[in-house]
Image (cartoon, rainbow, N blue to C red):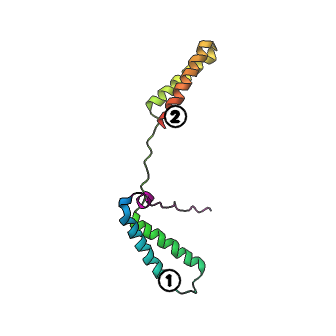
Amino acid sequence: MALSKPAAQKFDGERFLGKLNELEVRKHYHIEVSKRFATLENLSDSEDKNRAWENIKENIKTTAEESLGPHELKQHTPWFDEECLGLLDQRNQVKVQWVQDPSHSNVDNLNNIRREASRHFRNKK
């Protein structure tokens, strides 16, 4: 049985790295991390190294969550709409015409509608 890992939690890094007016956020983060690492220094040295790294990792995650807050993901908007469906149907009809009658005009018509549909799909994404 395979176990799935939980999705990595992301934090609003732009808020931390980006703007100069967010200096207080950076200061708050720095202070909180310093406090948490100060408490780690007071732990006994007999604790194994893996446990120490886990503590460091958890301290950084917790501090980032408190200081920065979670990163909000963008909502994807569906790009394939009725207009795209119409172009796709039109392209298929022109292709059927070309298969039935492979004349030069039908080839040109097919190439034009393919180009138009591809351009439209590319611009919609």
Find out whether residue 7 is within the magenta segment.
Answer: yes
Q: Quadrant of residue 33?
A: bottom left
CA separation in Å, label 1 and label 2: 55 Å
Instruction: Quarter of the image for the N terminus: give it.
Output: bottom right
Residue 37 visible, this orientation: yes
Instruction: Tell me, yes or no, whether the two marked residues, 1 and 2, touch with CB atoms within 8 Å.
Output: no
Closest to the observer, 31 or 107 = 31
In the image, residue 61 sits, relative to residue 107, either above or below, namely below
Find out whether residue 15 is within the magenta segment.
Answer: yes
Residue 122 bears which disc, if any?
Answer: 2
What residue sits right under mark 1 in the picture? 41
Counting other residues with Cα less than 10 Å from the Cα at mark 2, is it few (<14), some (14-19), or many (20 or more)? few
Q: Amino acid at mark 2?
A: Arg
The secondary element bearing badge 2 is classed as helix
Residue 97 visible, this orientation: no
Counting other residues with Cα less than 10 Å from the Cα at mark 1, is it few (<14), some (14-19), or many (20 or more)? few
Q: Amino acid at mark 1?
A: Glu
Q: Which residues are magenta?
A: 2-19
